[in-house]
Image (tube, helix red, strand yellow):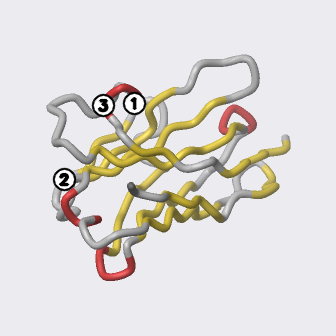
Amino acid sequence: QVQLVESGGGLEQAGGSLRLSCAASGRTFSRYRMGWFRQAPGKEREFIAAISGSGGRTYYADSVKGRITISRDNAKNTVYLQMNSLNPDDTAVYYCAADAYGSDVFIRRTSYDYWGQGTQVTVSS
């Protein structure tokens, strides 16, 4: 069982930045593709970014590409989401997820096996 805990959310003004962190338990973290999703009130959970186990490959949703960066530090069992140029549309609960079984698909929620509880990001205009 993998436990994921997100942190770093909060209130930020439009144009500001936040860095979210996701700390994972276990010793097999480097084997997992990690993803970030977000869910705004009344909306479905949507894919934001993913990163390969080694950190060598990253993937981004078109809506955030260029202002959001996913990274990981396997020595710390942690994945990060750097969020710049925030706007109110970024307001959502952000979730960290782990793909433990090497799915070929990385944008679907069902490809991920473990999920954190989420951290709230609120962006004011």
Q: Nearer the viewer, mark 3 or mark 1?
A: 3
- The quadrant the N terminus occupies is bottom left
In the figure, is residue 61 to the left or right of 54? right
Mark 3 element type = helix
Q: Residue at x 50, y 58 (%)?
A: 4
Separation (CA) of disc 2 from disc 1: 16 Å
Q: Nearer the viewer, mark 2 or mark 1?
A: 2
Judging by the rendered image, the residue that carries numbered circle 1 is: 62
Of the image marks 3 and 2, the number of the one nearer the N terminus:
2
Q: Residue at x 39, y 33 (%)?
A: 61
Question: Where residue 51 sits in the image (x, y, percent)?
Answer: 28, 52
Question: Where residue 60 sits in the image (x, y, percent)?
Answer: 35, 40
Label 2 CA crowd tier, 10 Å (few <14, some 14–19, many 20+)? few
User: Which residue of the protein is positioned furthest toward the front in this rendering?
Assistant: 1
In the figure, is residue 123 to the left or right of 36? right
Judging by the rendered image, the residue that carries numbered circle 2 is: 57
Question: Where residue 65 sits in the image (x, y, percent)?
Answer: 40, 41
Q: Nearer the viewer, mark 3 or mark 2?
A: 3
Mark 1 element type = loop
Separation (CA) of disc 3 from disc 2: 17 Å
Hey, what amino acid is under mark 3? Ser
Asked if the residues shown at circle 3 and circle 1 are in contact, with their CB atoms under 8 angstroms apart, the answer is no
Q: Residue at x 47, y 50 (%)?
A: 68
Hey, what amino acid is under mark 1? Asp
Hey, what amino acid is under mark 2? Arg
Q: Which mark is residue 111?
A: 3
Asked if the residues shown at circle 3 and circle 2 are in contact, with their CB atoms under 8 angstroms apart, the answer is no
Separation (CA) of disc 3 from disc 1: 19 Å
- The quadrant the C terminus occupies is top right
